[in-house]
């Protein structure tokens, strides 16, 4: 996304982080988007991705709606797992698409977003949280932190493009106001690309050595995940795997 590099706070950013892909397209050029759902809970992320996939137009310039294997603050801040995300990104995200990241506010997230390429839709629980994103031109703050609030903000953010159906709002409200059902992961994976934690294929890192996702060092004071946070996420992943095995046995 762009052919050169730029300097942000003394740090040279890789080409994918240039914002020109959004602002300098010609009138005859159609921008393609790639949406990533970064909610920490994998079932919430998959449910939101499935709901948005259901209301997008078949011929929309939205190349993919994807759920990365690492989400939340860890998507930006966990240096130990960047190689895993790089391989996933190279496999799941089409080249030259503008990323649209959907996430919920966590302490530390706001410090990672200034200057990064693409668009961000952030769910917030309070006006105080929303204030943390004031002045960030590439951030849309949702009117709440529920799945529905984030989904509606994403639809509104891309309203200028023929991406979502005219009745998208009504359909999202009907679907996301219902309590989740067991087996939410049984949505159309082929259209969403890899939404599970398991990589279906591995692509080598870019030859340039740059991360193909936003991974600039955080500004001073930004949160970096500690060992306890990684251990907690590992426990959560193991619990999720156990639940899936139990579902398989119960339906076998």
Image (cartoon, rainbow, N blue to C red):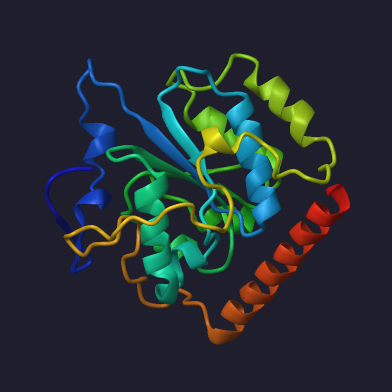
Apparent side of residue 65 relative to residue 63 in the rendered image (left or right):
right
Q: Residue 9 in the image: state x and y as whole percent.
A: 23, 66
Q: Nearer the viewer, residue 187 or 246?
A: 246
What residue is at 69 percent from the left and 76 percent from the top?
Answer: 235
Q: Residue extending furthest front?
A: 252
- Residue that extends furthest to the bottom in the rendered view of this protein: 227
- In the displayed structure, does residue 94 sit left or right of residue 10? right
- Determine the residue positioned at 25% across, 37% down: 21
The location of residue 201, given as percent across then percent down, is: 42, 53
What's the residue at 61%, 23% (across, down)?
Answer: 55
Q: Quadrant of residue 8?
A: bottom left
The answer to whether residue 143 is seen in the rendering is no
Q: Nearer the viewer, residue 32 or 123?
A: 32
Q: Nearer the viewer, residue 179 or 117?
A: 179
Q: Against 100, is 108 above or below?
A: below
Give whichever of 162, 141 is nearer the camera: 162
Determine the residue located farthest toward the left in the rendered image. 4
Horizontal side, residue 56 vs residue 17: left or right:
right
Number of numbered markers: 0
Residue 10: x and y, percent?
18, 69
Looking at the figure, which quarter contains the N terminus? top left
In the picture shown, does residue 63 fall above or below 17? above
Q: Relative to residue 56, is residue 28 drawn left or right? A: left
Q: Is residue 49 visible?
A: yes
Q: Residue at x 83, y 56 (%)?
A: 249
**How far from the left and from the top, in percent, is residue 114?**
36, 56
């Amino acid at each position: 996304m762009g052919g050169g590099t730029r300097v942000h706070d003394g740090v040279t950013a890789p080409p994918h982080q240039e914002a020109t892909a959004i602002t300098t397209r010609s009138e005859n050029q159609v921008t393609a988007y790639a949406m990533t759902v970064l909610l920490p809970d994998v079932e919430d992320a998959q449910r939101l991705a499935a709901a948005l996939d259901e209301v997008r137009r078949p011929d929309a310039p939205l190349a993919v709606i994807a759920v990365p294997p690492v989400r939340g603050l860890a998507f930006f801040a966990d240096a130990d797992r960047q190689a895993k995300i790089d391989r996933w990104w190279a496999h799941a995200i089409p080249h030259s698409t503008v990323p649209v990241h959907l996430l919920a506010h966590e302490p530390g997230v706001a410090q990672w977003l200034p200057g990064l390429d693409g668009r961000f839709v952030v769910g917030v629980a309070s006006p105080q949280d929303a204030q943390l994103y004031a002045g960030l031109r590439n951030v849309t703050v949702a009117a709440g932190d529920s799945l529905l609030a984030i989904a509606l903000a994403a639809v509104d953010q891309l309203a200028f493009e023929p991406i979502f159906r005219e009745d998208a709002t009504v359909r999202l409200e009907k679907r996301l106001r219902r309590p989740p059902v067991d087996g939410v992961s049984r949505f159309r994976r082929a259209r969403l690309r890899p939404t599970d934690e398991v990589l279906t294929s591995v692509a080598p890192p870019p030859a340039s050595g740059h991360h193909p996702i936003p991974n600039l060092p955080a500004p001073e004071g930004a949160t970096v995940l500690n060992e306890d946070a990684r251990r907690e996420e590992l426990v959560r992943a193991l619990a999720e795997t156990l639940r899936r095995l139990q579902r398989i046995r119960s339906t076998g």
